Amino acid sequence: MTNKELYSYVDHTQLKAFATWNDIVKLCDEAVKYETASVCVPPCYIKRIHDKYGENFNICTVIGFPLGYSVTESKVVEAKKAIEDGANEVDMVINISDVKNGDFDKVLEEIKTIKAACGEKILKVIIETCYLTDEEKIKLCQIVTEAKAEYIKTSTGFGTNGATYDDVKLFADNVGKDVKIKAAGGIRTREDMDKFIELGASRLGTSSAISILEN
């Protein structure tokens, strides 16, 4: 796969708590230059990015991030505000406590509620695989499918581990045909990028794509 083709899979990411506007401008300029799938940025920068760059690329953001245990009502407000400010894609973190408590109905209802708030915009559901058993991951594949979110996503990049080959394969074996896969967290090599795509990922969340592909 060529570099250009690989970039088309990348959500070019800058989510550090101390990210400055200069960091965000650098990210966005790179996204324009390399034609990445999106930029993935903190919600506080969406409107400023949209005002500066318009529709030059997809703006992706995160809600309930990175821990996921904020209440559904606050996630809905975050999602609606993000879209109002110019986001095209929303990556939400599930309430992992609900998963661990076996409250899967709550998880499903929250995803459905946020998907309704997003409307036609893309919703990616981060399940944070590093904290889950394989049985929980499979159940969440089923839930994300039922909720009609567009993507299931492995990780925030802030947990104890990021995407793994085994998890992306497990997703591919268990999600519905209309659900795509985003591998995120810990992608550090071209081999990783190629392998995740081979296993079924349609998006790669990474801050390292340019350093991987241009050096």
Image (spheres, rainbow, N blue to C red):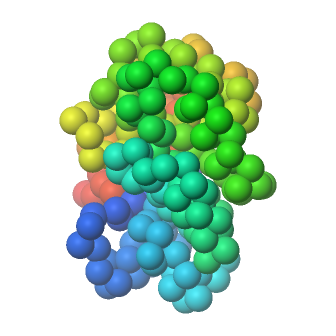
| Rendered-image quadrant of the C terminus | bottom left
Left-right relation of 97 to 40: left
User: On the image, which quarter does residue 99 sit in?
Assistant: top left
Q: Where in the figure is residue 213, as x and y percent of width and height?
A: 34, 53
Q: Residue furthest right?
A: 120
Q: Is residue 210 visible?
A: no
Q: Residue at x 39, y 60 (%)?
A: 13
Residue toward you, 127 or 161 = 127
> Which residue corresponds to the image point at 69% horizontal and 33% vertical from the top-left?
147
Report whether residue 152 is seen. yes
The answer to whether 37 is drawn above or below residue 108 in the figure is below
Residue 175: x and y, percent?
62, 21
> Residue 22 location in percent, x, y?
32, 84
Compared to residue 35, the image places residue 116 above or below, namely above
Q: Residue furthest bottom?
A: 52
- Where does the image place residue 134, in percent across and percent down from the top left? 40, 13
Q: Residue at x 27, y 47 (%)?
A: 158
Number of numbered callouts drawn = 0
Relative to 122, is 2 on the left or the right? left
